[in-house]
């Protein structure tokens, strides 16, 4: 089955005060709840990234976020997402990183760091393995029993990804789509990051332990 990122209609978001540069190394924080097929699904904030604008523009910031998201997903096995946001004067980019702890879904929101505006473009990660076992959160979206093996394509957009423009970081590349016939490779993720990750970026990648998010344990198939 292909990965499918589902748009989640959220209620009121209650945001904790965030540091101006990066998130502190802390447990994931529940910032919203979604009702999916009659089930309550908590939405967790796992980090925040800021960066000044460069000549590479949105692509440049997306590349930076991609390495953080890929590292986090590689460690925890599930999807994460960040809306790409910008200051009104265009001098800086930012994103709030979120997850519901699922392999097949990410919470689509317009959440932004304070003082920034949503661009309408997001970036999300896909699981790094071609086989995984559905967890309890996946079951809510897919109707599958937990621990049933799922086959996926880490570097392929799923049908629901085309709901709005967005980036997707897979196992091999960072991709961008603006519709079915407008898909491009932004960066080969087998290359080293364009800059050495800061200590703060590494802390974001290690914010949440797998046990901190209910149902996120991933057991690869053979």
Image (cartoon, rainbow, N blue to C red):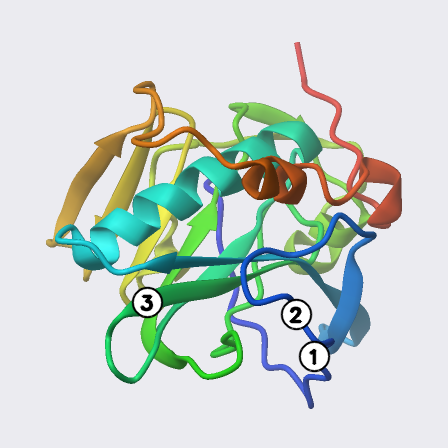
Dot 3 alpha-carbon crowd within 10 angstroms: few under 14, some 14 to 19, many 20 or more: some
**Percent of width and height locating residue 104:** 58, 48
Q: Tag 1's secondary structure?
A: loop
Residue, disc 2: 18
Are discs 3 and 2 less than 8 Å apart at CB?
no
- The residue lying at 88 percent from left, 40 percent from top is 211
Closer to the camera: disc 3 or disc 1?
3
Residue 38 appears in view: yes
Measure the C-alpha gap from mark 3 to mark 2: 16 Å
Closer to us: 168 or 36: 168
Closer to us: 135 or 96: 96
Q: Tag 2's secondary structure?
A: loop
Residue, disc 3: 92
Are discs 2 and 1 less than 8 Å apart at CB?
yes
**Percent of width and height locating residue 19:** 63, 66
- The residue lying at 58 percent from left, 73 percent from top is 8
Residue, disc 1: 15
Q: Earlier in the sequence, mark 3 or mark 2?
A: 2
Up/down of 199 relative to 183, above or below: above
Report the quarter where the C terminus lies.
top right
Measure the C-alpha gap from mark 3 to mark 1: 21 Å
């Amino acid at each position: 089955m292909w990965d499918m990122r589902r748009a989640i209609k959220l209620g009121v978001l209650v945001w904790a005060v965030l540091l101006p540069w990066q998130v502190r190394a802390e447990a994931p924080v529940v910032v919203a709840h979604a009702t999916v097929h009659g089930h309550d699904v908590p939405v967790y904030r796992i980090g925040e990234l800021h960066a000044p604008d460069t000549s590479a523009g949105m692509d440049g910031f997306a590349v930076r976020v991609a390495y953080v998201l890929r590292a986090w997903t590689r460690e925890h096995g599930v999807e994460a997402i960040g809306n790409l946001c910008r200051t009104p004067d265009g001098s800086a980019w930012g994103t709030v990183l979120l997850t519901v702890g699922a392999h097949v879904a990410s919470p689509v929101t317009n959440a932004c760091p304070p003082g920034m505006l949503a661009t309408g473009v997001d970036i999300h990660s896909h699981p790094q393995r071609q086989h995984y076992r559905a967890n309890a959160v996946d079951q809510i979206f897919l109707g599958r029993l937990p621990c049933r093996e799922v086959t996926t394509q880490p570097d392929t957009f799923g049908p629901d990804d085309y709901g709005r423009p967005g980036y997707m970081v897979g196992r091999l590349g960072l991709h961008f789509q603006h519709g079915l016939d407008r898909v491009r490779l932004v960066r080969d993720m087998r290359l080293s990051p364009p800059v050495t990750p800061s200590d703060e970026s590494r802390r974001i990648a290690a914010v949440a332990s797998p046990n901190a998010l209910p149902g996120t344990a991933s057991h690869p198939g053979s």
